[in-house]
Image (cartoon, rainbow, N blue to C red):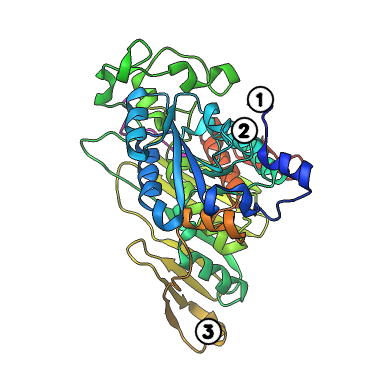
Amino acid sequence: MGRNLPTRRSFIKTITATTGVLSVGGLIPSFVLGANDRINYGVIGTGGRGTGLLRELVNRSGEENIQVKAVCDVFQKRLTEAKDICKGDGYMDYRKILDRNDIDAVLIAAPDHWHSKMCIEAMDAGKHVYCEKPLTLTCEQAIEVRDAVKKYNKVLQVGPQRTAQDRWWNARDIIRDGRLGKVTWAQGSWNRNNRGRSVFGTSDRRDDPVGPHMTGENYIDWDMWLGHKWGLAPRVPWNPNRFFYFRGYWDYNGGVATDLLYHFLAPLLLAIVGEDGEYPVRVNGNGGLYDNNDGREVPDVFMMTVDYPGKFTVFLESVLTNEYYRPARIYGRYGTMEFDESLSDISMEGVGSFMDKFREMNNDYEKMIIPPTGGRRDMHGNFIDVIRKGGKLNCNVNLGASTMVAIKMGVESYRQKKTMLWNAVKEKMIAS
């Protein structure tokens, strides 16, 4: 990635230099925040997902004592709508948000190829960061963002929502206590089969009268969106499909792997090895573009396996040709956990000749239903709490980066038709 990080005035650095006050564990002293401990937000990227998150922040602004003061988007129509929602300022250049000393945190919902640059620059400018998943586009960028969090000592939450569910944290405790036996593999899937609506490909938006050649509400700053000036993506002519459905193109996204499977690998790692995740040893990705060959580059059938140094394997699948899915499961020597998407609890039962060990570790039960404890805040509530009081994030940058590395290795395995290995010393992906 061609990073070109401008030198910015960092408010927290100024305070540290002049008063000796330090931030500890991602907790910034309350006087750095707005009046009355208020957290002032900037939202970068107000497409479908970004607008939904913007509305959520505005709706909870009273109870959480937060305020969205500024928004940014390269599409003027979206920017106008976002300003109306939050009653704040609007910019087409995200750096104008970062330049403001009255903004404490930014929410980044831009396309994936922008995530690393925006995250690092935001932390350099003294902001806390909520970054929608996936964390980045590449493995190298994931490591850069992880290291930047340590450098700037800011709070950075990554956005796979399942990590906010109690059951994955409960599963972590159960596995740590040995109640499932040695975990040797796990699975997760997210499948779709939409009809009459495009998924990651071409669409009826291609004829919209918008773009860099238009004016007023229909203007789109295409060059800024591409980011080619910073080496983020190649410079290509205006293409509405690439803009409206960027998840169909490798330059900006990893398709179903980064958009959907990231949601499952993060909580599975959380449960099996803990909240900091683990980097893989070997990854294989398979599948193809079998039925939806409508201009997209990403496959409509994708499956990947990830081997870990902790001696377990994760199998993930995501297809766009049939909505049948495999429930997420974690398989141990003594028993099996299942996480049905229609429920909020964990079902767990012993297996085979190890039933006696399962009963021994689980109060003589052969099957169990473990309800949620109800104590964990949702992603944004958790982010707000950690900024104010410290504590554990639902998905910290270590879990976010290790998940990103495995997912990207799966994408590259598919694209290169090779097994991908992770060099843990150099922190680099290698094709075998």
Residue of label 1:
6
Look at the numbered disc 3 and give the secondary structure of its residue. loop
Query: Could you tell me if the residues under marks 2 and 3 are in contact, i.e. CB atoms within 8 Å?
Result: no
From the viewer's side, name the closer residue of 184 and 296: 296
Numbered badge on residue 121: 2
> Label 2 to label 1, Cα distance in Å?
8 Å
Q: Amino acid at mark 3?
A: Asn
Q: Most extreme residue toward the front, as rendered?
A: 35
Residue of label 3:
362
**Start-end of magenta stretch:** 286-295
From the viewer's side, name the closer residue of 354 and 27: 27
Q: Earlier in the sequence, mark 1 or mark 3?
A: 1
Query: Could you tell me if the residues under marks 1 and 3 are in contact, i.e. CB atoms within 8 Å?
Result: no
From the top left corner, tell me how far across and down residue 3 is, in percent: 65, 25
Identify whether 258 is placed above or below 165: above
Query: Could you tell me if the residues under marks 2 and 1 are in contact, i.e. CB atoms within 8 Å?
Result: yes
From the top left corner, tell me how far across and down residue 286 is, in percent: 48, 40
Look at the numbered disc 1 and give the secondary structure of its residue. loop
From the top left corner, tell me how far across and down residue 382 is, in percent: 51, 58
Quadrant for the C terminus, please.
Answer: top right
The nearer-to-camera label among 1 and 3 is 1
Q: Amino acid at mark 1?
A: Pro
